[in-house]
Image (spheres, rainbow, N blue to C red):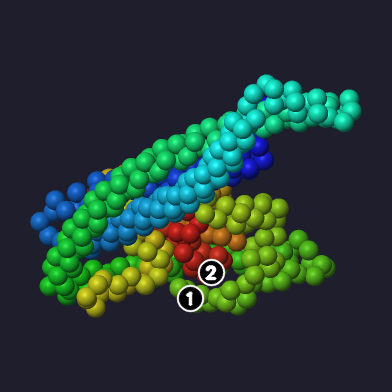
Amino acid sequence: MRIPLFLFLFLCSALLVSGQTTADKAALEAEREAIQQELNEIQKQYDQVKSQTKQTLGQLSLLNRKIQLQEQYLNSINNEIRRIEDNIYLNELEITRLNRQLDTLRAQYARSIVYAYRYRSNYDYINFIFSASNFNDALRRMDYLRSYRAYREKQVATILEHQELIASRQKDQLLRKDQKNQALSAQAQKVNELGAERKEKDVVVTQLKSKEKEFQKQIAAKKKRDKELLTSINAIVNREIEASRAKAKATAPKSPEPAPTEKTPAAGGSRRNEPAGKPTYLDLTARDVELNSGFQNNRGQLPWPVDNGVVTSNFGLNKIENTLLTFDNPGISISTPTAGTPVKAIFNGDVIGVFNLGDGMAVTVRHGKYFTTYSNLTGVTVAKGTALQTGQVIGKAGKNEEGVGGQVDLILMLETKNIDPRPWLRK
């Protein structure tokens, strides 16, 4: 049996909408699952920090991250509710349209029944055929009667199909309304959790504010440590630039030199942005070009240096609410549940520096024109000149400042310019 055109188009649109709805729902569920996994990891670390008798900057950092994730989770639920409401609205419009079509079909069928009732006797049919002017006209009248009978049967089938479609749509409505109720329940739960965490954060901030002078000393010590770290990293990077420049002159004395890097800034400084593809002394060799290209192409896909890590200090300016406490982070600080967690290279590269900062070790790895430094390490397992593979262990995470977990600081540089590592790591 041939499917009516309107029914074919309806089924196609229904399948298309259903597929899109399923994909959207799966994406939202995957997003919430990833958020919940990170929330679970943060909660484990937060429970450890919270067990201490005093509030710490680490506790506030974990609380801030929890609140941020809870807001993302809540936003995902809100998006799902809007999606369900849109589907309910569109489905209701479709049910109304189908009901109108059904009313029209029933009216047409009723008229055909009335007509058939008027000419219901066999005599009427025979008289209709034999009143033809000739044989061909009689054949046409017989075809007409057969077509009319088929038309009525098709009317019945179409009416039944519409009734089934309406029943199916109404069933979908009940399912979507149930999904909306579940989403609203989850929304209410998250709103309550978020409110409780914001109150807890206010308490922590108030207590931290009362110890502002004590934390000023901690921040001053961090600034000093970061300055020493950047000085060491810049010295290593500058040596790499100078070595590459010297190598270029020695290997190709008669050839035009590649465009040199701009004047090297003082330790801890930054340089003007260059287009990523501009040739420098740091991408002369095939390996340099390959590493540089590979690193760039994997932006947003690089693995984390530790498993189950949580960012507790972001890149750039960090400010403690309602206080004068601020510090500028040259990279990101990643907290781990325990000290001694293996720290791994985030991409292929060559170790160009291993140095001691007094309270921990640091390792600098070159990836073409990109450099990563992993600090606050213990048990370093690599040496200068080691060729690393992505995921290869280079050491272990040292203790954090609170002494209840581990921490590794990750710094990313494009030549001598500090850039935020977070957008380069997997979400």
* N-term-proximal mark, 2 vs 1: 1
Identify which residue is drawn at 62% across, 76% down: 262
> Dot 1 surroundings within 10 Å: few (below 14), some, or many (20 or more)?
few
Marks 2 & 1, CB-CB < 8 Å contact = yes
Q: Position of residue 316 (x, y in %)?
A: 40, 70
From where the camera sits, is residue 305 visible?
Answer: no
From where the camera sits, is residue 329 visible?
Answer: yes
In the picture provided, is 72 more to the left or to the right than 201? right
In the picture provided, is 235 more to the left or to the right than 153? left
Q: Indicate the quadrant where residue 375 lies.
A: bottom left
Task: Quickly name the residue at label 1.
Answer: 269
Q: Secondary structure at mark 2?
A: loop
Q: Nearer the viewer, residue 170 or 392?
A: 170
Q: Position of residue 395 (x, y in %)?
A: 40, 46
Count of number-bearing discs = 2
Q: Indicate the quadrant where residue 342 lies.
A: top left
Residue type for callout 2: Thr
Q: Position of residue 180 (x, y in %)?
A: 34, 48
Q: Nearer the viewer, residue 19 or 171?
A: 171
Identify which residue is drawn at 33% across, 67% down: 225
Task: Quickly name the residue at label 2.
Answer: 416
Q: Indicate the quadrant where residue 124 lies.
A: top right
CA separation, marks 2 and 1? 8 Å
Q: Secondary structure at mark 1?
A: loop
Identify which residue is drawn at 60% across, 57% down: 296
Residue type for callout 1: Gly
Identify which residue is drawn at 17% across, 67% down: 202
> Dot 2 surroundings within 10 Å: few (below 14), some, or many (20 or more)?
many
